[in-house]
Image (cartoon, helix red, strand yellow):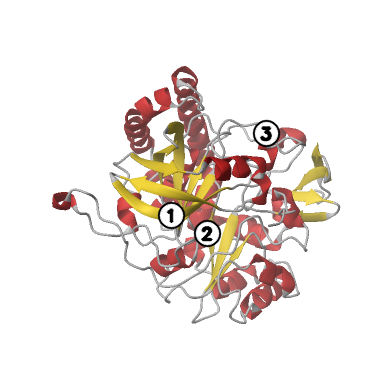
Amino acid sequence: MFLKPCLAFAVLLSACSGGETSEEGGAPDAGVLLPPDASVVPEQTAAYVFDDAALRTYELTVNETDLAWLNSNILLEEYVPATLRFEGQVIGEVGLRYKGSFGTLQSCVDAAGNKTCDKLSMKLKFSEFDKDLRFYGLKKINFHSMNSDPSQLHDRLAYYLFRSMGVAAPRAVHAKLVINGENQGLFALVEQVDGRFTKDRFADGGDGNLYKEVWPVHQTAQPYLNALKTNEDDNPDVGPMLRFASDLASATDATIEAVVADWMDLDGIMSYLAVDRAIENWDGIVGFWCVNGNCGNHNFLWYQGQTEDKVTLIPWDMDNTFDSPNVFLGLGQPVWNADPVDCTPVDVFEIDGLGTVGRRGASCDSLVRGLGVTMRDRYLAEVARLLDGPFEASHIASLLDGWEAQLADAVADDAFGPGTVAWQSELATLRASIATLRGQMQAEL
């Protein structure tokens, strides 16, 4: 076992390989479990797990010694055995560990290694102790604590909008988690982006390379190899990412659209960008954090196709969204798609052991500038489609009302959550923020 040294912002450092363990590929096996009532046997696919109309409970039994070890070694992100019971049936022995990055894990542990947050995000790996065990075809699922989101809805709503615009994005619902008979509360249940995800989403078979949090600015192979989440042991070919980065580096305002069109689906990346900007995702692809002169963004993955030189962006980690106004604009940070006067990072805060963290104007990056400035008309067309479709005001209001009704009892029973009064206040804030964000996007048009 070893301590993973990479904080969320250490993605800026070329030696850092990301905060999650390797994600193996493979064909999406059939699920291994059946509900106890044979008269209501569903189709055995992950769609059952991510049914938007259901709020399900996952029950785990963990040996007290293993649980104590887990709570004493939180940052190791190592699995301990747990027995999963789901809808009256014992599934088997699975792996359980805590998960997260700086804001969701490291910040919840003090200098002595003690847990300081009541609720931590967790990951279940079904194949950890039995390589053939699957759960509705899945190898892993994520339980996100939503500690930084008292509305409890950022993940679910953001991913819904991405998927509704045709973006390859994880499915997300809510679930209740019980460990050793004790209610751990309400979590966002988020689909793992791995080889199973890519096989389900991409028509080329999904066996291409999956990379986590590496932007196409590197001209050497190692940063891409470090970021691989599939095919790590199969002599992976990262040549396409190198060629993509080289083409971007040599692009001009006159040629950037042709370069992007060669490598990406233009409508698809503009759909991604429209949602990302509409939800004010300040910790995503336009959030360039800088440490010691190295600047980079995070909370995304790339899929590199296996049959042609094409790449696709996949969103990840949606808790820092739907904030209005964006706090970084008040710190002198330029608007993401404005020509920056200066690309010198603006200091934001200090992190022990890391130093001063700053932010740089997003359009200092050639790809972001091309998408948001040079190809602005294409971007605005997708903004209009979003506002008239999935992000239409009455549709969002209806969606939130339904989710509020579904989750109300679980929020009330969650001793580690915000509580009903605070939650309802945050829902009101979320609704007001959405109205403001819609207004901002309409003003762009």
Q: Position of residue 381 (x, y in %)?
A: 47, 54
Mark 3 closeness class: few <14, some 14–19, many ≥20 residues within 10 Å: few
Image position of 321 with respect to 162: above or below: above
Q: Position of residue 99 (x, y in %)?
A: 59, 48
| Circle nearer the N terminus (3, 1) | 1
| Circle nearer the N terminus (2, 3) | 2
Is residue 396 at all visible to an observer of this figure? Answer: yes
Q: Position of residue 79 (x, y in %)?
A: 56, 53
Q: Position of residue 339 (x, y in %)?
A: 72, 51
Which quadrant of the figure contains the N terminus? bottom right
Q: Which residue is mark 2?
A: 314
Q: In the drawing, does residue 7 fall left or right of residue 57?
A: right
> Which residue is situated farthest in the left direction here?
39
- Label 1 residue SS: strand
Amino acid type at image mark 3: Val
Q: Which mark is residue 327?
A: 3
State the separation of the CA atoms marked 2 and 3: 25 Å
Q: In the drawing, does residue 131 fall left or right of residue 263?
A: left
Query: Is 387 in front, or is 420?
Result: 420
Tell which tag, 2 or 3, sits nearer the viewer.
2
Image position of 320 with respect to 3: above or below: above
Q: Which residue is mark 1?
A: 93
Image position of 398 with respect to 24: above or below: above
The residue located at (45%, 67%) in the rendering is 131
Is residue 157 at all visible to an observer of this figure? Answer: no
Query: Is 186 in front, or is 428?
Result: 186
Circles 2 and 3: CB atoms closer than 8 Å? no
